[in-house]
Amino acid sequence: MSSRNLNAVPVLKPLMHILITTDTVGGVWTYTQELVTGLLAGGHQITLASFGWLPSSEQISWVKSQSGLDYRPTEYRLEWMEVAAGDIEESKQFLKMLVEEVQPDVLHLSQYCYGDLAVDKPKIVVAHSDVVSWWMSVHGKEPEESAWLRWYRITVRNGLRGADAVVAPSHWMLQMLAQYYGQPAHSVVVHNVRTAELFSPEARKDDIAVTVGRLWDEGKNVALLLRQDFSSSDLAMPIHVAGPCEGPQFRGDSLAERLIQRPGLHFAGELSQAQIVALLARASVYIATSRYEPFGLAPLEAALSDCALLLNDIPSFHELWGDAALYFQHNDSADLAHKLRYLKENPDVREKYGRLAYQTARKKFSPQRMTADYECLYQNVAFTEKVL
């Protein structure tokens, strides 16, 4: 396979037309909002195609706020959904026709399956997550072989091989790709971001902790909170849990019922972005229970809200947050309760971690930095000669 020399100095082109694919199901949409907003502000032309579900009213409102954005919504299944093969083939035809119609300079793809799309345009594939590394993190072993899993592995490998560059939000995620699908020929880490001005770090803090996560996603590990009594008098820091119960193939209704019934836990259900911002503004501590997290936008939003971060001890969190967070032992609810009690009883320590998280978020995860990184990558894949 031919590849592009990404180390070459690109021929600069001030403005570009980028075709971006996204999905409407989870954090990929939030990532896309930040990226598209930055690129449009820089004068680039954007065509955006979405998959998974048709967009919500909140998502449509954001699209309408972006002047000049060419948006093409679809409800083709995503590659990690079972019985998706037929939809993937149809969506590839849709994308090929869209490329022919709009003639972009670069394809920025948030799904692996389009990395081998048969078009004469440079392609960037972004590795937000994958099924095998998710399964390993959740179950401690690789998933059992099946016809669907074989199809999925082949689809991911072909997509990675067909891409001119592969992007991941952490080095840990790149390592997972190499381990389970083969080392991409050209790869780079570009961190996810959130706009700091959307959050309220100066708000008055209450004595509460917050966690936000999809209840239907076992990788978010929200059930860990049910293993301890967080209502005991020596702790007495209520934990507010927010997140949707229903996903594309799973439901978390039973978990929601147990959260509602458990003293010390307050289940808020699925909240709008504005409601999450308001909740984080009040919170003193953010608890990230995730056992699988290639990046984690919710901890970043909490950091920008001046919350102390109490994180599950997983490699990606250490890579991203380092000494700016406090960690509880891996999947250990007793240590979680112990560390939460420590933060409650030591407000000066809690405030210190809040400041550290905020400063780290502003320094490492700024939208301007992400936009500039992608602009440089687009130029390299689009305007340098291929090396045969």
Image: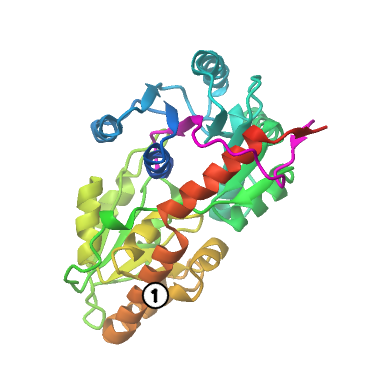
Residue 25: horizontal and vertical position, in percent?
39, 36
Eyeballing the image, is 335 above or below 289? below
Q: Quadrant of residue 116?
A: top right
Which residue was labeled with disc 1?
356
Residue 262: horizontal and vertical position, in percent?
24, 62
Left-right relation of 172 to 8: left
Name which residue lies at 26% across and 58% down.
199
Q: Is residue 326 visible?
A: no
Residue situated in front as seen by the camera: 379 or 196: 379
Left-right relation of 149 to 362: right
Name which residue lies at 60% across and 29% down.
113
Residue 166: horizontal and vertical position, in percent?
63, 42
Region rendered in magenta? 1-26
Residue situated in front as seen by the camera: 120 or 8: 8
Q: Quadrant of residue 235?
A: bottom left
Secondary-structure class at tag 1: helix
Q: Quadrant of the C terminus?
A: top right
Count residues near mark 1 (Cα–Cα under 10 Å), then give few for <14, some for 14-19, many for 20+: many
Q: Is residue 358 visible?
A: yes
Residue 304: horizontal and vertical position, in percent?
33, 63
Instruction: Residue type at mark 1: give it.
Output: Leu
